[in-house]
Image: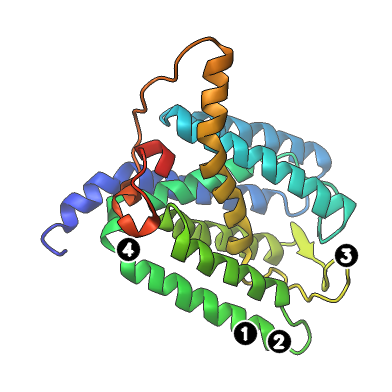
Amino acid sequence: MLRRAPGVLRSSRADLALAVGVMSWIGLVLWLDRSGPMAEQVALGVLTWGVLLLALRRETPQVRTQTGIVVVLATLVEYTFSPLLEAYTYRLETVPAFVPPGHGLVYLAALALGRTALFVALRRPLVIATVVVGGAWSVAGLLDADRPDALGAFWFVCLLGFLRWGRSQLLYVGAFVVVSWLELLGTAWGNWAWAAHDPVLGVVGQGNPPSGAAGGYGWFDLYALLLAPWVLRTWWRLRGRSSPATGGTTDASSDDTTDGPALEPAEAS
């Protein structure tokens, strides 16, 4: 590993830069949104859409489709669970304009981390670290006497399932990093706050944020991976053309046979 380190870092540079850039942008947007008016949220939303479209320029049709699916699904969930059910509430009590494209950026950042040669080389310690850190956070949340975090514990169990049986294990490791980052910043700076209990039964405790938020987000990743090939095939069929050969960005995590059957590069991402 030490002998290969320079080459691994060089080959990972572009995707690491993408992930760090996205996480920096998320931090900047949340910092600017701490106290501004609705007009500022709209402006940040327009800029975030621009950043997302720019980031997608180098990606394959598969990855673009996966990202689009995440944006659609996450937006539906946002409007259902925030202004409607109030499982969590944003500062201005509506979904900020930067949130839908932000979900696309979160997916891209997790994907970029997961497909780097660096993450592949460090697969085992990274997975172990994710389980240990996530598990400790989950247990600490459950033991909080003032606000037991049962939702976070459930989502952590989901994360364990994705890590064990997911089609792209390192994607979920990347999601743990990125989602934990944005949830900790967003709740600390008051961009949003989670209710103490679930909005349906009122008995399931929720942390602020829930400890296993990345496990909840993993469902978006799962459906993106499952639905993207079908969406692309349907799109090309409607256009009366055969689907083009997959090319462009590859996902190094597809080399791991423990993630399931061998996948096409973009499909595995």
Classify 10 Å Cα crowding around label 1: few (below 14), some (14-19), many (20 and above): some
Give the CA separation, mark 1 to mark 2.
6 Å
Residue 267: x and y in percent read 43, 39
Question: Mark 1 and mark 3: span between their CA atoms?
Answer: 24 Å
Residue 253 visible from this viewpoint: yes
What crowding class fits label 4: few (fewer than 14 Cα within 10 Å), some (14-19), or many (20 or more)?
A: some
Q: Which residue is mark 3?
A: 200
- Residue in front for this viewpoint, 13 or 24: 13
Please name the amino acid that badge 2 sits on.
Asp
Q: Residue at x 82, y 53 (%)?
A: 82
Q: Which residue is mark 4?
A: 123
Q: Secondary structure at mark 2?
A: loop
- Which circle's residue, 3 or 4, is located before the other in the chain? 4
* Foreground disc of the pair 3, 4: 3
> In screen coordinates, is 37 left or right of 221?
right
| Residue bearing the label numbered 2 | 144
